[in-house]
Image (spheres, helix red, strand yellow):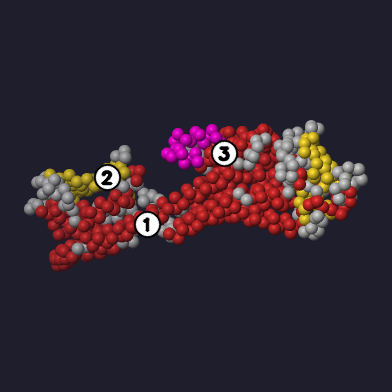
Amino acid sequence: MKTKIKNCLGGKAFTSVIIGFVILTLVFMIAQCIPYFEMDFTNKKMSSMLEGKYSVDGGEWKVTEPTRNIDDHFYKITIKGKLNETAANFDVLAFTSKDIWYTISSADGKFEISNRRSKPDIPEELFAPSDRMTGTPGFGVMDILTESFPKSVLNGKQDMIIEAEYPYSMATQSFSDCFGVMYCQQDGLYNQLFFKSMPSFLLFVLVCFFGLFFFPVSSFVLGKVNYKYLCFGALCLFWGLYMITQSLGDFLNLWITDVTICLFAVRMMSYLFISTIFLYFKSYLTKPVTRAIANCTIAAFFLAAATAGVLHLTNTLDLTATRPNIFVNIAVCSVVMIILLCAEIRGNRNTLLFLISWSPLMLTLIIDILDQYIHIPESHFFNYGLAITMAYQIISLILDLHKQYKEAIRYQQIQKELYEAKVNVMVSQIQPHFMYNALTSIAVMCELEPKTAKEATITFAKYLRGNMDSLKQTAPVPFAQELEHLKKYLYIEKLRFDDLLNIEYDIQTTDFRLPMLSIQPLVENAVKHGVGMKEDGGTVKISTRETDTAYEVIIKDDGVGFDTNIHKNDERSHIGMQNTKKRLRDMCGGEVKIESVVGEGTTVIIILPKEEQPNENTVY
């Protein structure tokens, strides 16, 4: 057996995986409610704050609708209307902004707030990073007490005007994604945020847990490091972190005072997330050429993302300005990955499962990339692609663990059978009659040839020790070791038969392994049932040779022979012969061929395929 199997793998591990799958299924059912949680606490429907009209990029005026977001993509947008009664009933209005400049003012111009910044009148070396990047809106939060608003605005007698500007060359975000408002009571902003965002936050923490522990640990339980599960574990980890930063991105400015660092944290986390997606795709590539190209592709994307990060930190170009270039880079890398994965389809045994493993994730990634340019309605499919991929990985992991569990059961059964076989072999080699004959021969020599008797006693003791050691030996041994043990057996038999038994050796190769005590039962048959049954004795010849595909051990005798057709069922076998065949087959993929002619002798050939030859690291 060449597969490394964990003996500890059992029903409990399999049950745990099943429970994990059920939990994950419930998680994704809950995930469908996330948009509603976000709707409550971010309240990005500006129409629910102002009842009036809005104009995008100087176009015609449209009426705000209380039940619909302002999802227009824009460079400049103006909203005019009266503050509704709901907003006026709260103590604080918290405005969140991402990548836009905005100004909120009253129609008479006496009240105005803005998130625009200007360089302070101090030496430049004392500037904070956000002071230097005055052209970068970043991600910010501004909480304003409603009592700060003019009474005419609060009581709905005067219009409020919101003017927002997207200062970048490519408008990739809708207004509702860039600007929002949250209502709360005084000193209740953090409490409101905590209770409203906690369900989604815990959900994505759970996803991080699956990425950090579930898939890596399950990979190791399989008995070896599974690169695919490790890569998907990293993908889940950074998916959870990415979604956490996305859900809290609007409010990072509550804890991080620098709005440009808030922008940096959210954008770079998304780029790290994309990197793990490409690593996951690469894990399904097996050809050296495709893996090399994938490595270069991932390195190119990582270099582009790192360059964008350095430009941001050095106040040269912020991450939103470089974002279109990064999306082009992602698109190119995705196309390259698609080509590489398609190149792997031909050599894949199960094409359907191979496609399911990566195509939903790749398809939804491409849709979200296209959305940056053509603004596909309701195009937030990426999480669904990830959910499908995670479900596939969970099912795949369950099947792998179940298969491993069955192999572990089979392994234990084989171990038991092999142990019993070894015991039977050992017993068959030291049967009482053999011991009696050996000891009787040694006793006779004690008077006639004391030195020979001494040597025979030592050899017999070593022979018995070798048989006992076979019980501890679980792996195949080098042929040279087996040959030495065989020579001890034949030495003792030679003492008994004397000139009636001749031994010849033709050893052309010893560079292979086979189960311990696997040759002796065959040689014993040749001695006992072959030349031993012949009045004038005979010769037993042990040979080895190497072919292009296998190693062969030949035991040939010129004894009485037998009819292979009559003895087809037992083939001159005793318990040692049957066990030997089974051990050779299970441990080395070997087979035993027997050729015999009555009156001429028998030839037994052991064939050991080279491709099945175990190495020193093989575990049994």
- The correct choice, above or below, for 74 with respect to 237 in the image is above
The residue lying at 37 percent from left, 57 percent from top is 409
Q: CA distance from mark 1 to mark 3?
A: 38 Å
Looking at the image, residue 326 sits to the left or right of residue 292; the answer is right
The residue lying at 60 percent from left, 41 percent from top is 381
Instruction: Say what amino acid the circle numbered 3 marks.
Output: Met
Majority secondary structure in the magenta region: helix
Given residues 408 and 510, the one toward you in this image is: 408
Q: What residue would you read off at disc 1?
A: 409
Q: Secondary structure at mark 1?
A: helix
Q: Earlier in the sequence, mark 3 or mark 2?
A: 3
Q: What residue would you read off at disc 2?
A: 607
- Magenta residue check for 347: yes
- The correct choice, above or below, for 529 with respect to 431 in the image is above
Dot label at residue 301: none
Instruction: Say what amino acid the circle numbered 2 marks.
Output: Ile
- In this rendering, the count of numbered labels is 3
Position of the C terminus, as image quadrant, is bottom left
Which region of the structure is painted magenta?
A: 337-356
Q: What residue would you read off at disc 3?
A: 362
Q: CA distance from mark 2 to mark 1?
A: 28 Å
Q: Position of residue 141 (x, y in %)?
A: 78, 50
Of the residues tagged 2 and 1, which is closer to the observer? 1
Q: Residues within 10 Å of mark 1 (few under 14, many from 20)?
A: some
The quarter holding residue 312 reads top right
Q: Secondary structure at mark 2?
A: strand
Q: CA distance from mark 3 to mark 2?
A: 49 Å
Circle 3/circle 2 CB separation < 8 Å: no
